[in-house]
């Protein structure tokens, strides 16, 4: 291992994380916009573009493995960082799948009138994407303090998810013919809620790189369930 | 249980080099403790303190306390000037970087030390030859040619013969100073596997030839820099998450 080689490879890995993150953020916001505007062409483009996110993920994983194999010894922060890149790219790829899922929902709803104004979903997406953007920035900068703060915003995402759920239940109760679309919109909300959860995983990895401690950031307020 | 307790050990050579500066650490029994760091850190010097091999070097001052414990917990002061160093070196054996086999047969390399120690029984000698070669993972390779000259062995085999030679005298501790530095990866692997097995019976203190070997082998690891003990801790943790920035910089290859 030469230090310069390893530094260069790590910089490249982090650059690639930024590229994939940018693709995921765009895909998410554009998928929600496509859903809101019944833009089926946009939805198809987003759906197909997920293949590029997947390809980049595998290339980055391969790059990490080759680095580990060829730049030994990799120790301490370097090792925690490379291991975390493997985890984070996996999280980003799953978030890309969520955006693709929202695009698919748009295609399934097609030109059917929306049973509910698409207002809360874009709001959820804005918060989730903002969280993702900040989380990846903190990861690149290895800023554990910033990473610790980000998961707190998940409360807003969860609150919107609950609201969408209640609204859709009310709609279904009033008109059972809305069940199919309500289910699809619920899935879209679910995807955004899961995206925010995965952002927390990225934040945990940032803290791990910095401190060597792998600890879950628990922002759950399910005290009524867990006691 | 600790095998060695080292407190405030300082050592200086006649050329003015302060090779060890107030080093304190405990070396647990039946485990592998690795001493690692850049050249000139004091690792080999500390190793040679543990069996008083430094008596043969140009040491002008040595202070502090170094104790070795037996299974019953009784301590012996290693730095005691009246200590029987020959007896100490039977308890604390050493394997060096360059394998130096005696100009004799394989068998005689192993029985030489035993005979010097007064063991004459042929049965005991033969048993010791087989046992020590088994422990050094060399028995299967040489069992049919024990009377062949030891110099005919490969480098890796010679090093394992040196290890067997140390083991024949049934020490309590094995010190190894870069034992695999001249060996190919397969021979290195065999020596390392042997040590992992041997630690069940012996206390092993190892100066590795690379950070990777240090990380592979260490139950405990001690990082030395310019005579100072910078950091000491669990082997796996220290290489993954060192506390001291200097340790981190070294294991990440930023210097040294």
Image (cartoon, coloured by chain):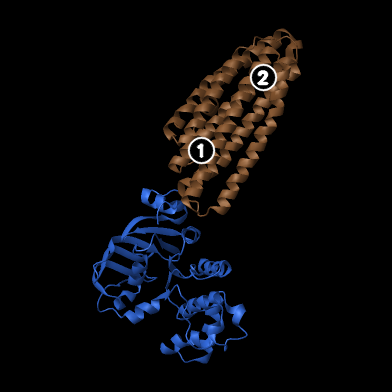
Q: Position of residue B25 (x, y in %)?
A: 33, 60
Q: Position of residue B248 (x, y in %)?
A: 41, 50
What residue did someone put label 2 on?
Answer: A186
A141 lies above or below A2: above
Q: Colour of chain B?
A: blue
Task: Give the image quarter of residue B32.
Answer: bottom left
A183 lies above or below B79: above
Name the quadrant of the C terminus of chain B. bottom left
Within 10 Å of disc 1 (Cα), the crowding (few <14, some 14-19, many 20+) is many
Q: Is residue A174 left or right of residue B164?
A: right
The numbered mark at residue A205 is 1
Q: Position of residue A221 (x, y in %)?
A: 51, 25
Which residue corresponds to the image point at 63% horizontal and 32% vertical from the top-left?
Answer: A94
Q: Position of residue A107 (x, y in %)?
A: 74, 19
Q: Is residue B45 left or right of residue A51?
A: left
Q: Is residue A163 left or right of residue B82?
A: right
Instruction: Using the rendered image of the protein, determine whether residue A206 is visible from the camera's viewpoint.
Output: yes
Name the quadrant of the N terminus of chain B. bottom left
Label 1 vs 2, first from the N-terminus: 2
Q: Are marks 1 and 2 in contact (CB under 8 Å)?
A: no
């Amino acid at each position: 291992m030469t230090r310069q080689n390893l530094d260069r490879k790590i910089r490249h890995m982090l650059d690639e994380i930024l590229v994939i993150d940018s693709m995921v953020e765009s895909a998410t916001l554009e998928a929600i916009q496509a859903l809101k505007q019944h833009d089926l062409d946009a939805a198809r483009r987003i759906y197909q573009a997920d293949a590029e996110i997947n390809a980049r993920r595998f290339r980055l994983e391969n790059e990490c493995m080759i680095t580990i194999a060829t730049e030994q010894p990799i120790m301490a922060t370097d090792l925690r960082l490379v291991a975390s890149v493997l985890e984070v790219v996996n999280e980003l790829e799953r978030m890309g799948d969520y955006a693709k899922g929202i695009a698919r929902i748009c295609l399934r709803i097609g030109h059917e009138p929306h049973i509910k104004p698409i207002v809360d979903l874009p709001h959820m997406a804005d918060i989730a994407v903002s969280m993702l953007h900040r989380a990846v920035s903190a990861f690149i900068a290895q800023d554990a303090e910033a990473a610790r703060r980000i998961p707190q915003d998940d409360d807003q995402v969860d609150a919107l998810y609950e609201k969408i759920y209640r609204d859709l239940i009310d709609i279904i109760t009033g008109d059972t013919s809305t069940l199919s679309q309500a289910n699809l919109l619920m899935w879209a909300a679910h995807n955004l809620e899961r995206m925010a959860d995965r952002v927390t995983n990225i934040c945990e990895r940032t803290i791990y790189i910095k401190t060597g401690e792998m600890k879950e950031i628990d922002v759950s307020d399910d005290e009524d369930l867990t006691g | 249980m600790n095998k060695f307790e080292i407190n405030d050990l300082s050592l200086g050579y006649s050329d003015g080099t302060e090779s060890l500066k107030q080093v304190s650490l405990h070396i647990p029994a039946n485990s592998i403790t690795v001493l690692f760091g850049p050249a000139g850190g004091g690792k080999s010097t500390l190793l040679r303190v543990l069996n008083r091999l430094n008596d043969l070097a140009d040491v002008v001052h040595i202070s502090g306390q170094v104790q070795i414990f037996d299974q019953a917990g009784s301590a012996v002061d290693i730095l005691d000037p009246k200590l029987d160093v020959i007896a100490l070196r039977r308890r604390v054996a050493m394997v060096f970087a360059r394998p130096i086999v005696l100009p004799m047969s394989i068998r005689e390399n192993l029985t030489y030390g035993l005979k010097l120690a007064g063991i004459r029984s042929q049965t005991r000698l033969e048993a010791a030859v087989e046992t020590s070669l088994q422990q050094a993972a060399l028995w299967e390779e040489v069992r049919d040619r024990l009377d062949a000259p030891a110099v005919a062995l490969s480098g890796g085999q010679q090093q394992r013969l040196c290890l067997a030679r140390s083991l024949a005298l049934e020490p309590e501790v094995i010190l190894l100073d870069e034992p695999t530095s001249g060996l190919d990866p397969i021979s290195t692997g065999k020596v390392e596997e042997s040590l992992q097995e041997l630690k069940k019976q012996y206390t092993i203190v190892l100066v590795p030839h690379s950070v990777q070997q240090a990380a592979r082998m260490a139950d405990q690891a001690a990082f030395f820099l310019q005579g100072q003990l910078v950091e000491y801790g669990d082997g796996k943790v220290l290489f993954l998450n060192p506390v001291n920035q200097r340790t981190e910089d070294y294991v990440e290859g930023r210097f040294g």
